[in-house]
Amino acid sequence: MAMTAPARIVVGLGALGLILTVVNQATAPALEPPLERAAVLAGILSVLLMLVGVLGERVLPLEAERAALTGREGLELSEGLPPELARELGWGSTLLLTATPAAVVLVLWNGRAVLRRGLLADTAYVPGPIADRALATGRAISLVDLRLYPGRDEFDGLLAGLPSVLVQPIGERGLLLLGGWSARCFSRADLLWVEGWSRRLSEDWPTGPDAPGSG
């Protein structure tokens, strides 16, 4: 992986300092003890400076590059939703698209799409084995790099070419799916926020035969 510009500058300054120390030693008329001690200290500091540049690159790695996703920007909300639920879905999906690396948000209830927002595919999403497993276990499934999963075609209906997907159950009947702009883009804080919002949705979702997504 290529180093960032600040890291290259730090490593370059360390290398330059080490080279100048060697040149200074080689051109000195006499190697007196004070000069030798100064050369050793300067060499150590130069090496430490280069290590800071290299190790800093590992501690703070580059963010994954955003994929060139294609889709139509839009919002699709089921008709007949209670005003409170519509507002909840509206503000929640807005925050997910602006405060997290999500490119598309999909809310399913009883297998039916209640909300689609962000970059939308032209085809409808049909839950597959991965989504069914998340719903059956009641636990979120985070696919950090879809290229590594043989079942990635399941999410073409969400949006083709997604680098990562988060599948979060909403109670026992709903699913919240997020497609990320890049691989490994969802942080621990994002996962906690999504889990909390899904719990809120499951508690506030209307029940009964006339509830949204029923039937």
Image (cartoon, helix red, strand yellow):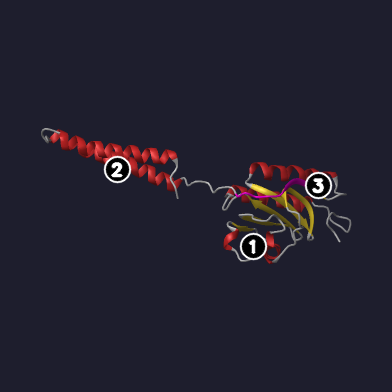
State the residue position of label 3.
Answer: 85
Label 2, label 1: how far apart the Cα atoms are: 46 Å
Relative placement, left or right, of 99 versus 72 is left
Point out the frontmost of discs 3 and 2. 2
Point out the frontmost of discs 2 and 1. 1
Q: Residue visible at 85% across and 47% down?
A: 82
Task: Check disc 1 and report its element: helix, strand or loop.
Answer: helix
Residue type at tag 2: Val
Task: Check disc 3 and report its element: helix, strand or loop.
Answer: helix
In the image, residue 210 above or below residue 35: below
Along the polypeptide, which appears first: circle 2 or circle 1? 2
Q: Of residues 75 and 100, which is closer to you in this image?
A: 75
Query: Which of the labelled discs sits on residue 17, or is there none?
Result: none
The image quarter in which residue 163 lies: bottom right
State the residue position of label 1.
Answer: 152
Q: Of residues 195 and 143, which is closer to you in this image?
A: 143
Along the polypeptide, which appears first: circle 1 or circle 3? 3
Q: Which residues are magenta?
A: 67-75
Label 3, label 2: how far apart the Cα atoms are: 60 Å
In the image, residue 42 above or below residue 136: above
Residue type at tag 1: Arg
Spot occupied by residue 2 in the image (x, y as percentages of width and height)? 44, 47
Relative placement, left or right, of 165 versus 50 is right
Query: Which of the labelled discs sits on residue 47, or is there none?
Result: 2
In the image, residue 83 above or below residue 203: above
Label 1, label 3: how far apart the Cα atoms are: 31 Å
In the picture, the quarter occupied by the C terminus is bottom right
Q: Residue visible at 26% across and 39% down?
A: 18
Spot occupied by residue 27 in the image (x, y as percentages of width and height)? 16, 34
Q: Of residues 64 and 106, which is closer to you in this image?
A: 64
